[in-house]
Image (cartoon, helix red, strand yellow):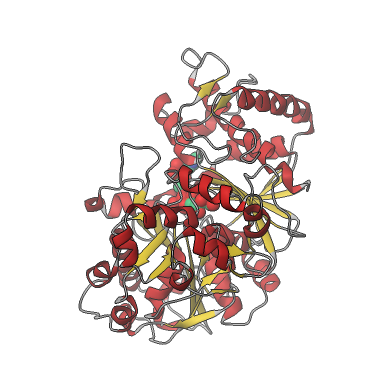
Amino acid sequence: MRPSLPPTSRASGRCARSTTLIRGGRHMALYLGIDLSTQGVKAELIDPENPAAGSGGFAVGFGADLPQYGAPEGFVPDPDPLVRAADPAMWLDAFDLLFARMRDAGAPLGEVAGISGSAQQHATVCLRECFPRVLGNLDPGKTLAEQLVPCLSRRFSPIWMDRSTARECRELEARFGDRLRRETGSPAVERFAGPQIRKFAKEAPEAYRDTAAIHLASSFFCSVLCGAPSPVDYGDGAGMNLLNLRTLVWDGEIAAFTALGLPGRLPRAVPSATIAGGLSGYFEKYGFRAGTPVAVWSGDNPGSLIGVGAGEPGIAVVSLGTSDTFFAAMRSFHTDPDGYGHVFGDPAGGFMSLICFSNGSLAREAVRKECGLSYEAFDRVTPVPESEHLLLPYFVPESTPLVLEPGAEYGFDWASAPAEERVRALLESQILSMRLHSAWQNEAFRRIRVTGGASKSAALRRIIADVFQSEVETIAVSNSAGLGAALRAANAIGGIPFDMLYGRFCAPVSVTRPDPARKARYDRMLEAYRQLEAGRSGTAAARLR
Ligand SMILES: Nc1ncnc2c1ncn2[C@@H]1O[C@H](COP(=O)(O)OP(=O)(O)O)[C@@H](O)[C@H]1O
Ligand SMILES: O=C(CO)[C@@H](O)[C@H](O)COP(=O)(O)O
């Protein structure tokens, strides 16, 4: 059994466990998976022939390790809660730091046979014409940031938390109506790349003219590894409002309307098992072999679908990272009539659903601090009271349902409630919202796999099991996006079938069984939550109509 990443992994360096992959020994072929998330970059190194031997995982936290960027939560603080951007220079420095740490810890990077990765979804990186030339001539004597920042035509990248494109979404909806949802898998969505690019082209036309290529964070980092521009995979590409999921090519009409000349600025869209290229010689300084095959990167949620072993329909996944997401491989392509759910490419083939709640760990963090609790205490107090208190947990702008003006709304006397009641109300409300807004999938999932930082919380796992009346399973590695990237590399490059990899790396290590006695309670609370949400001014039950 592989132990999970200890909580310290976020802060810095290598996790406490040190295993055989670091201590030495011969390996047939190792695969490396990297995940660039909102708050840090993490890596998982696996040996498919010896799944018990882990690297322990490596991590760089933007706040703790790169404080000079002033982005403690991974984005540049902005007084406007709708504006959220990150500095690609910080991401690039984190990459150099991550690989240096792996080399210094003795990770056998020379034995890596294949690499892939994933990134937080929707973030765009805009690049000048010089990008391919600079990439092809990276100087190992300099840092990635020193060399690549001059290629940026937009200095900061809007990330998935940005909600400043309501106008552009309205324009896209007015032009294409329901075709957007039916063919790109989602209505126009504020955080998606298309509306973000439209806003950029309108507000900074010169910088847009100076832009030769627009990458997602995933295809940007795949390009950096390969030393040449990389395609976008269907998993992450579907989060742009630009990819036609019926034809699996960029929708020329939608792209041309989004911004003049956009079709010529987009990388190719390809299946997730595509080999993007060979590793750039720049990375030899960390001990890698130049030319090591790199499989295209994906989004962190599609990557996690693979990392928890749920690439086939039947198991739902709840990822409790900075955002909370609920997703599952789909049996058939269908879209959410309310417009909150999305359809992305499943890296194992076919499609996956996804619903994103922006008030995931950020909301839990806000309440935890307000109550002055540690996470251990937070976890201990939650199962105690059986009160049926609810709140709308909009501590930051919310995607599901769409809430642009943040402000939590309480269905009970919040100020005088004891800390444990507040915490329980928050966690139950978050999971009830998840049940409410995932119903469009029309599938009763009997098994849910949980992942992400907050999946360590036994209280949250209990609430998920009881609210959904499903078994809730964990796997050993909580960095499922990083593990998913390593598994994708082993599949695409090593030719190892996913079901074999799932069997070796994704077996459940804990199961929380639902308590049937709580079913009636949560059915009742779901109805009460629906009414609380419907009664809030400025919160639409459906994005569309
Ligand atoms: N024991 C815990 N209980 C609840 N939340 C936790 C716990 N440990 C960590 N977290 C939360 O996990 C979050 C990070 O999760 P992670 O999956 O690493 O995020 P991301 O991939 O989005 O950067 C932190 O914001 C923190 O609030
Ligand atoms: O916007 C979405 C999904 O559509 C987010 O889930 C991002 O992909 C960020 O992921 P985390 O950093 O929270 O894992």
- Camera-side residue of 194 and 217: 194
- Where residue 383 sits in the image (x, y, percent)? 60, 28
Is residue 29 shown above or below 184? below
The residue at 39%/80% (across/down) is: 228
- Camera-side residue of 214 and 294: 214
Please identify the quarter of the rendering in which residue 353 is found: bottom right
The residue at 43%/24% (across/down) is: 371
| Left or right of 183, for residue 9 | left
Work out whether residue 164 can be spotted.
Answer: yes
Please identify the quarter of the rendering in which residue 385 is found: top right
Is residue 449 shown above or below 297? above
Work out whether residue 310 can be spotted.
Answer: no
- Where residue 516 sits in the image (x, y, percent)? 79, 33
The residue at 32%/83% (across/down) is: 136
- Camera-side residue of 83 and 30: 83
Is residue 369 shown above or below 239? above
- Where residue 425 sits in the image (x, y, percent)? 57, 25
| Left or right of 461, for residue 298 | left
Image quarter in which the C terminus is found: top right
Image quarter in which the N terminus is found: bottom right
* Number of numbered discs: 0
- Where residue 241 sits in the image (x, y, percent)? 55, 57
